[in-house]
Amino acid sequence: MTANPCIQVERVSKRFGKKVVIDDVSLEVQTGEIFGLLGPSGAGKTTLVRMIAGIDAASEGTIRVLGVNMPNLGAMKRIGFMAQSDALYGELTALENMQFFASIYGLRGKKQKERIDDMLALVNLTNDRKKLVHQYSGGMKRRLSLAIALLHEPDVLILDEPTVGIDPVLRQSIWAELERIRQRGTTIVVTTHVMDEAEKCGRLGMIREGRLIAVGRPDELKQEAGAETIEQAFLTFGGVRR
Ligand SMILES: Nc1ncnc2c1ncn2[C@@H]1O[C@H](COP(=O)(O)OP(=O)(O)OP(=O)(O)O)[C@@H](O)[C@H]1O
């Protein structure tokens, strides 16, 4: 693999009190790839991506993003992060939320309007853009959060379970957009427990009980595990065999 790491996680552990949630994880994400973190609920995916995004500090080990040790405010400005819980203003409309975040990201004028229109269309919210967000359903809020995270085409985009509650057709177009963003040079880290989404990632890290149990391209992982599906491969890597 060409060595152009965008994210370097080195021997990182995270404890909450006595509980070890991330246990000695090392991995590299290359510039311009979509890297998926796959694992069941409670495996530690959110904890890991929050540390990569610079929102939480590691208990042990180091994380470098774009060449600097995290957490770092300068690097955080170049990282787009979509959390699992939505950070939206309920008393504003969807459009106003987008305009607000677009201004924070430094998007203005015609470029702002175009990008907002495109992202609203992508997540199928064009017709609901003037509704107050507190009238939105959970799925609509999710889609709006995603549209906001995609607004500014950051150097690094970190998405924590971006398609939960989103229907399969829309999921396809969202993944197509992620691929377009990647091709323009953004490095993407996405957490998921949906197996067919995992297949769409360039490389995958399988995580279970805070440990990284396997890393590789989906086809490599299946081959290595002698498995037909990513799900089977996960079970093989996570089972007693290793
Ligand atoms: N602030 C915290 N204090 C104590 N324990 C925490 C904290 N945050 C996370 N945990 C624990 O760490 C473990 C991993 O949680 P995490 O949210 O990272 O998992 P996850 O893989 O993202 O799961 P999910 O897919 O359900 O979001 C869980 O057991 C959780 O209870």
Image (cartoon, helix red, strand yellow):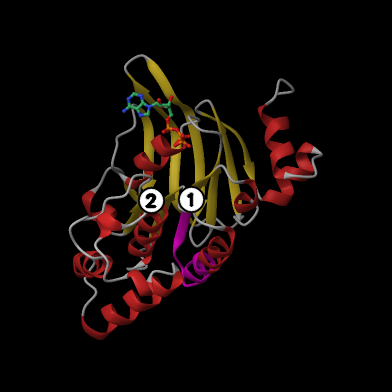
The residue lying at 48 percent from left, 27 percent from top is 24
Q: Which residue is under mark 2?
A: 138
The residue lying at 40 percent from left, 59 percent from top is 143
The residue lying at 27 percent from left, 59 percent from top is 133
| Ligand 1 picture quarter | top left
The correct choice, above or below, for 209 with respect to 183 in the image is above
Q: Are marks 2 and 1 in contact (CB under 8 Å)?
A: yes
> What are the residue bounds of the magenta stretch?
177-189
User: In the drawing, does residue 38 fall left or right of residue 80?
Assistant: right
Q: Residue 170 in the image: x percent, y percent?
A: 53, 64
Looking at the rendered structure, the secondary structure element under dot 2 is helix
The correct choice, above or below, for 172 with respect to 49 in the image is below
User: In the drawing, does residue 14 fall left or right of residue 171?
Assistant: left
Please say whether residue 216 is one of the residues in the magenta stretch: no
Q: Point out the image quarter for the C terminus.
A: top right
The CA span between labels 2 and 1 is 8 Å
Q: Amino acid at mark 1?
A: Gly
The image quadrant of residue 66 is bottom left
User: In the drawing, does residue 137 fall left or right of residue 87?
Assistant: right
Q: Quick one: 229 or 183, which is closer to the camera?
A: 229
Q: Which residue is under mark 1?
A: 165
